[in-house]
Every structure is written in structure tokens, then in C-alpha cells.
């Protein structure tokens, strides 16, 4: 039996969500809090769970004045105590994945991407670390995780144009790189075009593209609970924006659009600052043998409430994998990898964004 567990984070008010309600916080928060969302879950020390939480005002700017008393956590209707709280100081591990395909030579796009990466590095604190991955028809780790701005700046300057566009493989490479680190993990991917796997043009033949389809890259990121921040650079006609939006949406990351390269540096600096302004809340889960389902969140109108989903893992994970194979015919290509995180009944919808109502049902009996 799979039993879906809900974790709510509430700042204030009582917000109904798919038949559930978040409790009222014990303390009234600052009036400028507009939205609260979980950006990442770290369950590497389960049953100790750390949530990384962004609180923003109506303009989307971070709110940095909250304390532990402003947060109420509830798991499956059971209040849980916040045992650890940090308003700053969490180590940020970022993997910057930059497109260096030949199309990046147009309109100074590669130079703009390098300037943006430099701006991100300039925002690093002494204990943060960043890795650089450049991709064309293949992905190269230009610089492994480093805290030294000098090493990172040198690596950024060394990126040169090459080959086609294997975007989906680059996402997988970024997920793999982040598996070596713990804590807050940021995967930031920039591309100015379509994966040659799908474009199949004279200048971008399929063999210059990814080996993995987009569905497999999304499933791989979700399997490793890694949201993907995606930046589309250039004209909307050239970047296949729906695909980039899909990658961000289905991995519960975020999509950003920059029509010109000169806008990238400000965007990257702002993203770095926003991540550094997040809160880290730690609690001990009262339920054994649970795994987090890939993150999803909801704005709550006014002050925010966020739901998180868990399922009780069976003694033998092969049962889920077998169910995934059985349901693969109803799912799109590459989704079977998500079977380890989703019951078979979800496989038909996992390749497209799905609402909370599909995963927050009270009728969550035997699957």
C-alpha cells in the first residue's frame, strides 16, 4: 500500500488545498510576505529532513525578516517541531551549465553567458561552491566544484565554441555532478537553441544532439530530486521555449527568458541572491521508510502554504520498478525511470505537469 504523506508549511492563515487545510501559524508574520515555497528537500539524513524555503513579497523579492516562530510544519496532519532553523549561512552548491554550441557565436551570446557566470561567481560567499559544465554535442566539466573565485573565473574564460546542442544530456550531467554534494543544490542551465536530437537540420544533425530524450532527462532529475532552473537566451522562435518551460516545470524548477545576452548578468546575480536568502528548516519525520516525491508547490493567495508529498516505500523497491514496466505502455518514452518515485497509476500523467489533486487524494488506499 502506498500512502501519500503531506507536509504543509504555513506562514499564516488556513489554506485549503485538495481537501486538506494548513494550520494557523502561532505568530503573525510580517505583512509583506506574499508567497512561500519549498525549493528543495534534503532527506539524505532521513528521518531528519531539511527544507529549503523561499519567502517573497508581492514583487518577488526575498523577505529576510522571518524567524522559526513564523513557520508551522505539519506532516500528514501531525504537527512536527522545527528542530533547526537558519535564515542565512546555508552552503550553496551550484552547477552552472552553459551552452557553447556554435549558435552562441551570434549576437555575443557566449560572451554574455560568460559575463553572467562571472556575475554569479561574484555573488558567492566564502563557503559556497560552484562547478562549471559547458556543453555542445557533448558535456565537459570545465571546473569541478570550487570555492575559489579565481579558479572559476579562469574556467569561465576558457569556454570556447564547439559542436551542436545536446541539451538533455547536459541536464543529466548537471544532475550527476550535484550528487557528490549535500545541502542546497542549484542546477542552472542556459541554452539558446533546440537539442539537435529533435531539430535535425543541416547545421544541427541528430547525431550532434542528445542520446537521451527530454522525457528521460526530466525523469532523471526527478529521480534525484533535483529541480532545474532554465534560462532561454535569444529569440523565442529559436530556443524552443515550450521545451525549456517543460523542463523547468516538470522538475519543479523555474524558467527565465532573456531575449538578449546583456540581460544575463543581472539575472544570474539576482538568482544567486535569491537562493542565498532562503531559509533552512529541519525537522524529524515521524513516519518511517518514506521517500520524498519530486517537489511541487502552490501559491496560497496572500500568505503562502506549501504541500509536499511522500510515499511509504515498500520493503522491495523492485515491486515499484515492475509496476513501472507494466505501465510503461501508457506513458511516454523515458518515464519508466520515474517508476521508483511514482506508483504505476501515475505513469500516464508523469510526463506532463499535473495538479495537486492528482497526488493529494484522501482516497489513497492500495495502489
Image (cartoon, rainbow, N blue to C red):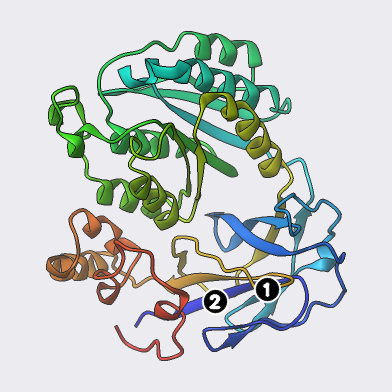
Q: Quadrant of the N terminus?
A: bottom left
| Of callouts 1 and 2, the N-terminal one | 2
Residue 94, position as x, y percentages in the image: 55, 34
- Looking at the image, which residue is at 61% across and 19% down? 118
Spatial CA distance of label 1 from label 2 is 19 Å
Residue 299, position as x, y percentages in the image: 62, 68
Above-or-below relation of 247 to 345: above
Quarter of the image for residue 71 reads bottom right
- Looking at the image, which residue is at 21% across and 32% down? 196
Left or right of 204 on screen, residue 223: right
Above-or-below relation of 363 to 107: below
Q: Nearer the viewer, residue 207 or 283?
A: 207
Q: Is residue 151 visible?
A: yes
Quarter of the image for residue 52 reads bottom right
- Looking at the image, which residue is at 33% across and 35% down? 238
Q: Nearer the viewer, residue 282 or 305?
A: 305
Q: Which residue is mark 2?
A: 6
Above-or-below relation of 269 to 276: above
SS under mark 1: loop
Left or right of 19 on screen, residue 81: right
SS under mark 2: strand
Which one is in front in this view, the residue at disc 1 or the one at disc 2?
1
Q: Which residue is mark 1?
A: 301
Quarter of the image for residue 171 reads top left
Q: Quadrant of the C terminus?
A: bottom left
Amino acid at each position: 500500500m502506498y500512502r501519500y504523506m503531506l507536509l504543509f508549511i504555513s506562514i499564516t492563515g488556513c489554506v485549503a488545498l485538495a481537501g486538506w487545510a494548513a494550520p494557523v501559524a502561532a505568530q503573525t508574520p510580517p505583512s509583506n510576505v506574499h508567497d512561500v515555497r519549498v525549493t528543495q528537500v534534503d532527506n539524505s539524513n532521513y528521518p531528519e529532513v531539511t527544507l529549503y524555503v523561499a519567502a517573497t513579497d508581492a514583487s518577488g523579492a526575498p523577505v529576510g525578516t522571518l524567524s522559526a516562530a513564523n513557520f508551522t510544519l505539519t506532516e500528514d496532519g501531525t504537527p512536527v517541531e522545527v528542530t533547526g532553523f537558519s535564515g542565512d549561512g546555508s552552503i550553496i552548491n551550484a552547477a552552472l551549465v552553459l551552452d557553447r554550441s556554435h549558435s552562441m557565436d551570434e549576437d555575443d551570446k557566449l560572451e554574455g553567458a560568460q559575463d553572467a557566470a562571472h556575475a554569479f561567481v561574484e555573488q558567492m560567499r566564502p563557503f559556497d561552491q560552484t562547478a562549471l559544465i559547458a556543453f555542445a554535442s557533448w558535456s565537459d566539466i570545465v571546473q569541478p566544484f570550487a570555492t575559489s573565485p579565481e579558479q572559476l573565473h579562469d574556467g569561465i574564460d576558457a569556454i570556447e565554441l564547439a559542436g551542436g546542442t545536446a541539451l538533455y544530456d547536459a541536464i543529466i550531467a548537471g544532475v550527476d555532478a550535484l550528487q557528490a554534494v549535500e545541502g542546497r543544490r542549484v542546477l542552472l542551465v542556459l541554452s539558446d537553441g533546440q537539442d539537435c536530437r529533435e531539430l535535425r537540420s543541416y547545421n544541427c544533425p541528430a547525431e550532434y544532439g542528445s542520446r537521451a530524450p527530454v522525457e528521460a532527462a526530466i525523469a532523471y532529475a526527478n529521480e534525484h530530486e533535483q529541480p532545474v532552473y532554465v534560462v532561454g537566451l535569444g529569440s523565442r522562435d529559436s530556443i524552443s521555449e515550450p521545451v525549456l518551460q517543460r523542463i523547468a516545470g516538470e522538475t519543479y524548477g523555474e524558467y527565465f527568458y532573456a531575449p538578449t545576452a546583456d540581460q544575463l548578468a543581472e539575472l544570474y546575480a539576482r538568482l544567486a541572491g535569491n537562493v542565498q536568502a532562503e531559509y533552512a528548516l529541519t525537522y524529524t519525520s515521524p513516519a518511517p521508510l518514506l521517500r520524498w516525491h519530486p517537489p511541487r508547490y502552490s501559491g496560497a493567495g496572500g500568505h503562502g502554504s506549501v504541500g509536499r508529498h511522500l510515499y511509504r516505500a515498500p520493503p522491495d523497491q523492485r515491486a515499484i520498478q515492475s509496476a513501472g514496466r507494466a505501465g510503461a505502455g501508457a506513458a511516454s518514452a523515458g518515464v519508466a525511470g520515474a517508476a521508483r518515485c511514482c506508483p504505476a497509476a501515475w505513469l500516464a500523467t508523469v510526463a506532463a505537469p499535473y495538479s495537486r489533486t492528482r497526488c493529494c487524494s484522501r482516497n489513497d488506499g492500495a495502489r
